[in-house]
Amino acid sequence: MAAKKAKKSKKTQDQRMKWWRDAKFGLFIHWGLYASPAGTWKGKKIPGIGEWIMNRAQIPVREYERLADDFNPVKFDAEEWVQMTKDAGMKYLVITAKHHDGFALFKSASSPYNIADATPFKRDPIAELAKACKKAGIRLCFYYSQKQDWHHPDASGNSWDFPDKSKQNFNKYMREKGLPQVREILTQYGPIGLIWYDTPQDITPTQAKKFVQQVYDIQPDCLVDGRAGHGIGDYESMGDNLIPPARVEGDWETPATLNDTWGFKSYDHNWKSADGLLLRLVDIVSKGGNYLLNVGPTDKGVIPKPSVTRLKQIGKWLAKNGEAIYGTSASPYPFEPGWGRITAKKGKLYLHIFNWPDGEFVLHGLQNKVKKAYLLAGKNQKPLACEQEYDQAADLNVLRLALPKKAPDRLASVVVLDIKGDPVLDQTIVPDGDGSLTLESYNAQIHQPKNAAPLTRGRFGTIENWFNAQNRVSWECKIAKPGKYDVVVLSQTEHDGSWEGGHKLKASIGNKSTSGTARKKEERDNPRATSYLLDVVSPIGQIEIAKTGTVILSLKAEKIVKKKGLGIKLRAVQLIPMEG
């Protein structure tokens, strides 16, 4: 829900949001005193994310403060950081002006606990970044922890130094530090793109509104993220590293890490691959969101090389294919095709093809006339041969494209379709070009009797808490080719192996059905956001579909194993045409 904007702004909400909607890709920077211990305190590795070390290790304020005595990031180079942002194809930069530890990365008259006054560095890196961002055309934005401040006795989060909550007066903190510092960052560094608030916790609606209104009063066109609290803000910020399973209406973003931490940890080397990061970018944009990707610099002011390398690789792809990302809208399909993703602009569809076919590409469901089709990247932008027809028996619009045998890009090649009018696509689930279908749980219809425990939908789109054999789910979809199909169930697990098999499942289409036991044939990376999710692949049999056209596939559990009490965590059902 968008907060009420200041009366001073002469722009509509759409005008205020336009730069952000067009940008799609931004850099998050978590940097502060926590970069010095880098995940280790008194010789012990502290579990959890790096910037939370003060909290996780219960470090007293007076001990943690001493980190400032030696914090001297002499290798910090604002222009280098901003150039890296630009090379990555990112359009805005969000840096932690103050994180939960209470230490400010800017010169603050409201609190001497800041980088310019409390450290030997004696400089204001935010001022230097503001200058570099202006020069490079990158929008400068700030993260500010509005509710948690472990350094201040009247803020939230520090229960080891300030255990008596009855003595805390959060309004006093707001008057002394919170609101004055927000005013400082809005008045000292020129136009700011957005303020990124975080962890509102038990903030009251009145307090949340004061933090938001402070922004709109000083810079009416500055945006506020959705973590201000109580549904206030200009757009929704998803959970950390959370990519929704399907298209989301409205303005939203996914804030995400390159490894498993936000602030620098010297021993966190679990880097996501550049390929995976790029596919996530395309996935998020195809669902209508922005991708805010984080780096955690060292205490010397150096962004780790693995971060720089990965961002540079994404930037190279965007340099050739950025038209299909920047300023686009979400896919008109209500489902994700198995071959890749779709983004759109007025009169154009961008087909991001992950799995390049051998010669011919088939797209089902597009009702618009294609005026021209061509490859986005490379020198060859000559029209691709294409044919369109309507298969009456299958009730399917079919587009066939003649593609070169070699993909223009190793990972994601973009085909542009110039179309007549606004895109109109089949809203029923349609097959990929080879006839296969992936029926995602988020598109399923849930059927359950009144006396059965209700099925629930997990945050990654799964159907969960399936413990009752009376429950079933179904999908309406279209079949392009008659014949026998393998039925494969994809259930979700995590890398810790928390998966329970042995359930007997039955899939039905009309009077045809197949039953089989869910056993682990293989595991695959799950296409959702986090790196710890896996798909357990369980073939349960074959089913013969005699006719093309619209069918309803139902899935029920004939027997549910309850040894671990995990039940079925359904991610999808696949129908794969059998060879021959």
Image (cartoon, rainbow, N blue to C red):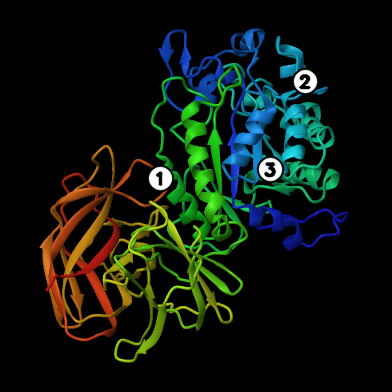
> Can residue 113 be seen by looking at this rendering?
no
In this rendering, the answer to whether 178 lies above or below 477 is above
Q: Residue 204 carries which label?
A: 3
Amino acid type assigned to the residue bearing label 3 in the image = Thr
Q: In x, y percent, where is residue 100? A: 62, 28
- Local packing at callout 2 (Cα closer than 10 Å; few below 14, some 14-19, many 20+) is some
12 sits left or right of 197 in the view:
right
In the image, what residue occupies the spot 46% across and 51% down?
243
In this rendering, the answer to whether 423 lies above or below 38 is below
Which is nearer the eye, 263 or 78?
Answer: 78
296 sits left or right of 149 in the view:
left
In the image, what residue occupies the spot 65% across and 47% down?
225
Q: Which mark is residue 515?
A: none
- Where disc 2 sits, the SS reads loop
In the image, what residue occupies the spot 86% across and 56% down?
7
- Which is in the foreground here, disc 1 or disc 2? 1
Q: Which residue lies furthest to the right in this view?
A: 8
- Local packing at callout 1 (Cα closer than 10 Å; few below 14, some 14-19, many 20+) is some
Question: Mark 3 to mark 1: distance in Å?
Answer: 42 Å
Amino acid type assigned to the residue bearing label 2 in the image = Ser
- Where disc 3 sits, the SS reads loop
Amino acid type assigned to the residue bearing label 1 in the image = Asp
Q: In x, y percent, where is residue 512? A: 14, 79
- Where disc 1 sits, the SS reads helix
170 sits left or right of 303 in the view:
right
Quadrant holding the N terminus: bottom right
Q: In x, y percent, where is residue 350? A: 50, 66
Which is nearer the eye, 560 or 192?
Answer: 192
Quadrant in the rendering for residue 441? bottom left
Q: In x, y percent, where is residue 269? A: 40, 27
Residue marked by disc 1:
275
Residue marked by disc 2:
111
